[in-house]
Amino acid sequence: MTSTAGFTPKTEKLPYLRVAIRKLDTVKILLLVLWETKSLDNKKYIALSEKLSGAGKDLGAWHGSLVAKQNSPSQRREEK
């Protein structure tokens, strides 16, 4: 999804980013379940969750910048 979003025009990126964020959240939940059931030790859980958290921050920032540009006054003027 992120690769697709990276190569699509700005006006078409948001749906792909939203799916990528949803999928990342699902992976985070499944990782938590693995940790809580003791299928994953603390060290591995921490290492994986830190990387996923970083990816989530990046996706969130990307999504936020697209939403901000979409809602900017200059963008609204162009739509009219």
Image: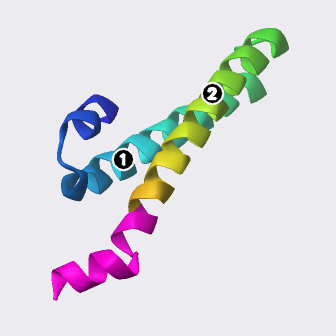
Residue displayed at 60% across by 35% down: 28
Q: Which stretch is magenta?
A: 67-80
For this rendering, which residue is in front, 40 or 19? 19
Badge 1 density bin: few <14, some 14–19, many ≥20, Cα 10 Å: many
24 horizontally vs 1: left or right: right
Q: Is residue 36 above or below residue 75?
A: above
State the quadrant of the C terminus: bottom left
Residue displayed at 50% across by 58% down: 64
Give the distance between the C-alpha atoms of the residues marked 1 and 2, in whole angstroms: 21 Å
Q: Which residue is tagged 1?
A: 17
Question: Secondary structure under badge 1?
Answer: helix
Residue displayed at 19% across by 79% down: 78
Residue type of the residue flagged with mark 2:
Leu
Q: Position of residue 30 (x, y in %)?
A: 58, 32
**Residue 35 belongs to magenta span:** no
**What predominant SS class does the magenta segment belong to?**
helix
9 horizontally vs 18: left or right: left
Q: Which residue is tagged 2?
A: 31
For this rendering, which residue is in front, 70 or 55? 70
Q: Between label 1 and label 2, give the one nearer the viewer.
A: 1
Would residue 32 be visible to someone looking at this image?
yes
